[in-house]
Image (spheres, helix red, strand yellow):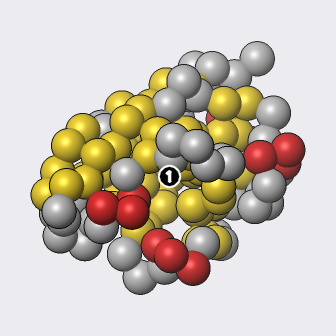
Amino acid sequence: QVQLVESGGGSVQAGGSLRLSCAASERTFSYYAMGWFRQAPGKEREFVAAITWNGGSTYYADPVKGRFTISRDNAKNTVYLQMNRLKPEDTAVYYCAGGSVGRRPSDYPYWGQGTQVTVSS
């Protein structure tokens, strides 16, 4: 079973940048599409971005399009989320997930523990 560990969260002022990383425990990571989701207090978990197994296609939620970039390095079993021009509404716990490419949490059977991102105005 693939285990996923996120890192790179933290606190930043609006307009700043953060890069999240998600390291997988197994080489079978390269077989899976990977996604990033986020969950703010009192809200449902929502799709942020996804990338196919070979990095050939990427998908983004409208609120982050043009500001966030998802990428992966299969040699390092790692997926990244570069977040630029951060806004207070980006504040949430961010989760990486592995599975079939899609925008629903149910598309992904494997999940990390989450990393907090806080953006202050």
Mark 1: which amino acid? Arg
Q: Quadrant of residue 61?
A: bottom right
Residue shown at 24% from the left, 38% from the top: 10
In the image, is residue 2 above or below residue 93? Answer: above
Residue 118 visible (yes or no):
yes
Residue 92 placement (x, y as % from top left): 44, 46
Residue closest to the eye, 99 or 111: 111
Q: Quadrant of residue 15?
A: bottom left
Q: Is residue 23 left or right of residue 88?
A: right
In the image, is residue 25 above or below residue 104? Answer: above
Residue shown at 59% from the left, 72% from the top: 60
Residue 53 visible (yes or no):
no
Residue 24 placement (x, y as % from top left): 56, 28
Q: Is residue 55 left or right of residue 94?
A: right
Residue closest to the eye, 100 or 114: 114
Residue shown at 37% from the left, 51% from the top: 91
Residues packed near mark 1 inside 10 Å, few (<14), some (14 to 19) or many (20 plus): many
Residue shown at 20% from the left, 43% from the top: 11
Image quarter (top left, top right, bottom left or bottom right) of the N terminus: top right
Q: Is residue 108 left or right of residue 36?
A: right
In the image, is residue 67 above or below residue 14? Answer: below
Tell me the residue that label 1 is attached to: 72
Secondary structure of the residue carrying tag 1 is: strand
Which residue extends farthest front?
Answer: 42
